[in-house]
Structures are given as structure tokens and as C-alpha cells.
């Protein structure tokens, strides 16, 4: 491990109205190493990275690259200093092609006034081939899955030939296969002397790739540890400031009558013959690889997508769900995996985002009961420990994990009978994950039915009563709690 310091930040502070996001943060990144930043949601990780990327300007503190003090006023400055960043919230333009996306902002010139499109497209084709991706440079980003878009983002950052690469939760929406791809890339980059700052909430991942780990809490640096001289437990307790006892607070909830049933649901070429039931008090998991069709099934049930045949029953009665609004009206709620697209209205405040799904409750004879609405929104946000100066803050200003908590709060407030959760803990810190699991238990205890789609097997194994394993659009089988093991589930998910 090179001891040479590539980048150093000293006493960086940054405030937003009502929040001191960074308070005298310092750390040093060594050349050719991976330095992981971890900390709870809202600890300040993304803010610090945005300072390095020139998106925010620090109020105080200095940045040094190769021992020289630098001023970074814009992303262009960051690029000029060899810094590239992969953002936590994907920043792609769906209607651009892959090539346009990769070259955005650094177009290859042709003469003085023209762009060398051929070069950009050729270069992109070459990249796709080299990385074994089944895409053409002309494909539009919107035709790719979230996971593949994330891969393109990674390639884009890599192709900048950056010396310092910042990755803010790069694996939050990709599957194991793509994670392996990313980790191979990271190894290659390290060998080339690239220094990497890596942000993640996934502890096993952190320990696989970190050379050093710095923990932030409430905007301050708590400690920097060498990865081979610390443990997961130590890092977690540094992050949350206490010891976490029981990660999965699963209780023995009485399983009641059937509340929800799907029969032979089929959507041509996407999923086929999907039948399952959920009982009151039951947490039913859906395991499978990314792309196995789990999200698509949930979307169809929730009225977001069409399906060709099949039936849905709620409390034994056959129902037709025409739209998400219709689903909500009938008592079915869904927390979706892609919060940017479906979960939130970024420009609006927390209060509106939360009460959106339950507005009817706050109207009486055409008059809005704002006080009650405020009180109840405050309550659920408090319960979820949403970190914000007030419920009037715009949701886009919250940290990634706190946005997810707001979405959960929204569904809590409208009190559904059946709650579909698609990757609910994506991007959520370890402490808050446990809080979400506690909420799942509360729902179960209240006799609701819960459907949990997750790519994290420990989470499914820890929280579910029953797991359906999906394999290429089919249900490959279902398992009872006592039968759960990672090997069995994975075996069913990949066999053919
Ligand atoms: N543009 C902004 N305006 C106001 N407040 C902001 C803004 N950006 C971040 N914050 C606040 O600064 C704090 C730190 O947020 P940041 O996004 O850096 O957290 P994080 O550590 O990346 O969390 P997560 O793990 O959830 O992504 C939070 O309280 C957040 O609400
Ligand atoms: Mg963040």
C-alpha cells in the first residue's frame, strides 16, 4: 500500500440552513488505495464528496492534492484536478444515447466548431465490447435497466482517466454479478495508481475492498482505521455511537387468515403463472436475482404496469386494480425500489410528500385540516427518526437514506392493509435498517400483510415467515422459515 498521500482534506465545514452538515472534517486518501467513508444517513458523506467535486463550496477548510492546496469551485475544476464522481442518485439523461451520456460535458472536438461524433461513438462501442456489455453506443439510456445504467455510470467515470475516483453508494442498485464487475474494475484502477473514495452502507462489501475506513457521525470525523486492524462490530458501533444488539427483531407474530392472494398472474415475456398468498401478520419475502421479475410483478399488482392474465384477491374478494391511486384506495401500498422515479416529489417539502398518499384523511367537507396533518406528519417523521431541520425542508435536500425514511413514513400514515416493500432498506444505514425492521414487525403485529422484495438475503432470512424464490420470471419454489439458508435460496434462484 502506497504511503504517499494523494488527497487530503483539512477541517472542512459546511452548513446549510438549519444544518451543520460538516464540522471540521479531516481525512487523508493514500495513493492507489480504497478509502471507505461510512456513517449513518445524514452523517455528511455525500456533502463532503460534493465539496470535493465542486458542487458545494466549503465554508471553511482546505483541500490538498499531491501536497498542493487546491481550490475547487466547480465540477470542471474537480475534473481539472483529476477528480471524477459517481453519484448516489443517478444523474443520467434517459433520452440520450449511451455514447452521449458517457461523453457528456467533455465532448470530443472536431476542428473548432464541430464535435467528433464518430470518435465518440467508436470509442463507446469499443468500451461496450471491451467490458462485454450487450449494448450499442446508440442505445438510449431509458432502454437499460437501473443496474446497467449504473454500470454505464461506472464506465463513464473510469473513462475520465481520473486520478481520484469518488463512488457514492455505487452498488445500491446493482446485483452481485455487477458488483463483482465493479470490484474487478476497482482492482484494475488501484493497480494503475488511482485513489478511490468509496461510500457504502453494506458492511460485507466495505470489508472486501477497503484499505482504510473513516467513520463520520453528525458531520464530524470519528475515526480512521486500517481495514485489517478493525472489525465490523467496531465500525458499526463507531457509526451509531452505541452497540447494536439485535439486527433482526423478528417476533413470533400470530399468522391469521389469508388477506391477499395472487393467482396465475402473467405478463408476456416478463413473468408467468405467478401465484402466492399472504396472511395477516405474515411477512412474505421474494428472493431472486436482479432481473428475475420481482419488481415487475409488484408493479403490475400495484397498477403501474399491465398484465395479461391472472387474478388478485383482497380479503377473499376478487379485485381489479386500475392504477396506483386505486390500489391505495383499496388498502394496498407500495414502496418502490427507484425512489427518484416513483417515490418522491423532490421539489416539495417533507410534509407534502408524506401526507400525499393520505390527503383524504385531512379534508373534511372540503376544508383542509392543516394542523392535524402537520401534527401527524411530525409524529411519523419522529418515529422514523428522519433527520431534518423541519418538515418544511424540501425532500431533495435530505440525505439519500432520509429520503427513503420519508417514503416509509408516508405509507405508515395511510395505514394500508397490505404493504409491498421493494428493496426498502436500500441506502439505509445499519442503525436505521433495524428501525425499519421494527416497523415491519409493528405492521405484522397489527395484522397487516407484508410483501418484502429484497436482494439482501440476510434481510429476507432475518425477517420473513415465508420466502418465494423467483427464477427468470417464474416462482421456482417457496420456503418456510425453518428451511431458510442462503445456499438453498441461491440454489433455487440460479438453477435452470
Ligand atoms: N442542499 C442541501 N440543503 C440543505 N440541507 C442539505 C443539503 N444537502 C445535504 N443537506 C443536509 O446535510 C446533512 C448531511 O447530508 P448528506 O447527504 O451529506 O448525508 P449522507 O451521509 O450522505 O447520508 P446518506 O447515507 O443518507 O446518503 C443532512 O442532514 C442533509 O439533510
Ligand atoms: Mg449520501
Image (cartoon, rainbow, N blue to C red):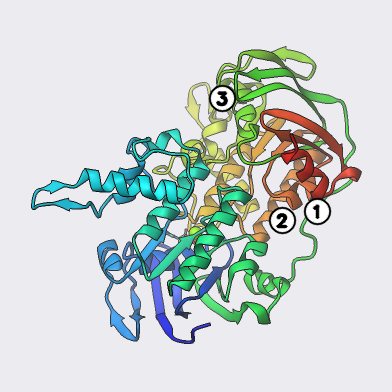
Compared with 5, 395 (above or below) is: above
Check disc 1: other Cα within 10 Å, few if <14, some if 14-19, many if 20+.
some
Which residue is drawn at the image coordinates 76% and 59% (left, top)?
247
| Residue 133 horizontal/vertical position (percent) | 48, 44
| Residue 331 horizontal/vertical position (percent) | 67, 25
Q: How far apart are marks 3 and 1 (CA)?
A: 30 Å
Q: In which quarter of the image is the C terminus?
A: top right
Q: How far apart are marks 3 and 2 (CA)?
A: 28 Å
Compared with 173, 87 (above or below) is: below
Residue holding disc 2: 434
Q: Which of 437 and 80 is in front in this view?
A: 80
Compared with 483, 471 (above or below) is: above
Which residue is drawn at the image coordinates 59% and 28% (left, top)?
299
Q: Do the residues labelled 2 and 1 touch (CB within 8 Å)?
A: yes
Asked whether residue 348 appears in the rendered view, the answer is: yes
Q: What element does badge 1 sit on?
A: loop
Q: Which mark is residue 324?
A: 3
Q: Which of 192 and 245 is in front in this view?
A: 192
Asked whether residue 10 appears in the rendered view, the answer is: no
Q: Which mark is residue 249?
A: 1
Left or right of 493? Residue 126 is: left
Check disc 2: other Cα within 10 Å, few if <14, some if 14-19, many if 20+.
some
Mark 2 or mark 1: which comes first in sequence? Answer: 1
> Quadrant of residue 62 in the image?
bottom left
Q: How far apart are marks 2 and 1 (CA)?
A: 7 Å
Which residue is drawn at the image coordinates 65% and 51% (left, top)?
383
Amino acid at each position: 500500500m502506497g504511503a504517499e498521500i494523494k488527497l487530503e482534506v483539512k477541517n472542512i465545514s459546511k452548513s446549510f440552513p438549519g444544518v451543520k452538515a460538516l464540522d471540521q472534517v479531516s481525512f487523508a486518501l493514500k495513493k492507489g488505495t480504497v478509502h471507505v467513508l461510512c456513517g449513518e444517513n445524514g452523517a455528511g458523506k455525500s456533502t463532503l464528496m460534493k465539496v470535493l467535486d465542486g458542487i458545494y463550496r466549503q465554508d471553511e477548510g482546505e483541500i490538498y492534492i499531491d501536497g498542493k492546496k487546491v481550490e475547487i469551485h466547480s465540477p470542471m475544476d474537480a475534473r481539472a484536478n483529476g477528480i471524477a464522481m459517481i453519484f448516489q442518485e443517478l444523474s443520467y439523461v434517459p433520452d440520450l444515447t449511451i455514447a452521449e451520456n458517457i461523453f457528456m460535458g467533455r465532448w470530443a472536438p472536431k476542428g473548432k466548431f464541430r464535435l467528433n461524433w464518430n470518435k465518440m461513438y467508436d470509442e463507446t462501442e469499443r468500451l461496450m465490447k471491451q467490458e462485454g456489455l450487450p449494448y450499442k453506443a446508440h442505445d438510449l439510456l431509458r432502454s437499460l435497466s437501473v443496474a446497467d445504467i449504473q454500470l454505464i455510470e461506472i464506465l463513464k467515470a473510469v473513462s475520465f482517466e481520473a486520478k481520484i475516483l469518488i463512488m457514492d453508494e455505487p452498488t445500491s442498485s446493482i446485483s452481485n454479478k455487477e458488483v463483482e464487475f465493479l470490484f474487478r474494475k476497482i482492482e484494475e484502477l488501484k493497480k494503475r495508481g488511482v485513489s478511490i473514495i468509496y461510500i457504502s452502507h453494506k458492511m460485507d462489501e466495505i470489508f472486501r475492498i477497503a484499505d482504510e475506513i473513516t467513520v463520520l457521525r453528525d458531520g464530524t470525523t470519528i475515526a480512521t482505521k486500517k481495514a485489517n486492524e478493525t472489525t465490523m462490530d467496531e465500525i458499526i458501533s463507531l457509526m451509531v455511537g452505541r452497540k447494536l444488539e439485535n439486527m433482526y427483531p423478528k417476533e413470533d407474530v400470530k399468522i391469521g387468515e389469508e388477506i391477499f392472494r395472487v393467482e396465475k398472474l402473467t405478463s408476456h415475456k416478463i413473468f408467468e403463472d405467478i401465484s402466492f398468498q399472504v396472511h395477516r401478520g405474515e411477512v412474505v419475502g421474494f428472493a431472486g436475482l436482479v432481473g428475475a421479475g420481482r419488481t415487475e410483478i409488484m408493479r403490475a399488482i400495484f397498477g403501474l404496469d399491465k398484465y395479461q392474465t391472472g387474478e388478485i384477491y383482497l380479503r377473499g374478494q376478487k379485485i381489479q386494480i386500475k392504477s396506483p391511486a386505486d390500489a391505495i384506495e383499496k388498502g394496498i401500498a407500495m414502496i418502490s425500489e427507484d425512489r427518484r422515479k416513483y417515490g418522491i416529489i423532490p421539489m416539495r417539502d417533507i410534509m407534502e410528500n408524506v401526507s400525499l398518499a393520505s390527503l383524504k384523511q385531512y379534508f373534511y367537507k372540503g376544508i383542509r385540516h392543516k394542523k392535524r396533518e402537520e401534527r401527524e406528519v411530525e409524529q411519523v417523521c419522529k418515529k422514523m427518526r428522519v433527520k431534518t431541520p423541519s418538515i418544511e425542508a424540501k425532500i431533495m435536500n435530505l440525505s439519500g437514506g432520509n429520503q427513503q425514511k420519508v417514503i416509509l413514513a408516508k405509507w405508515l400514515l395511510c395505514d394500508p392493509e397490505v404493504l409491498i416493500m421493494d428493496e426498502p432498506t436500500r441506502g439505509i444505514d445499519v442503525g436505521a435498517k433495524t428501525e425499519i425492521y421494527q416497523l415491519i414487525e409493528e405492521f405484522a403485529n397489527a395484522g397487516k400483510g407484508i410483501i418484502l422484495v429484497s436482494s439482501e438475503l440476510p434481510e429476507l432470512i432475518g425477517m420473513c415467515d415465508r420466502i418465494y424464490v423467483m427464477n427468470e420470471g417464474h416462482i421456482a419454489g417457496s420456503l418456510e422459515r425453518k428451511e431458510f439458508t442462503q445456499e438453498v435460496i441461491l440454489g433455487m434462484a440460479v438453477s435452470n
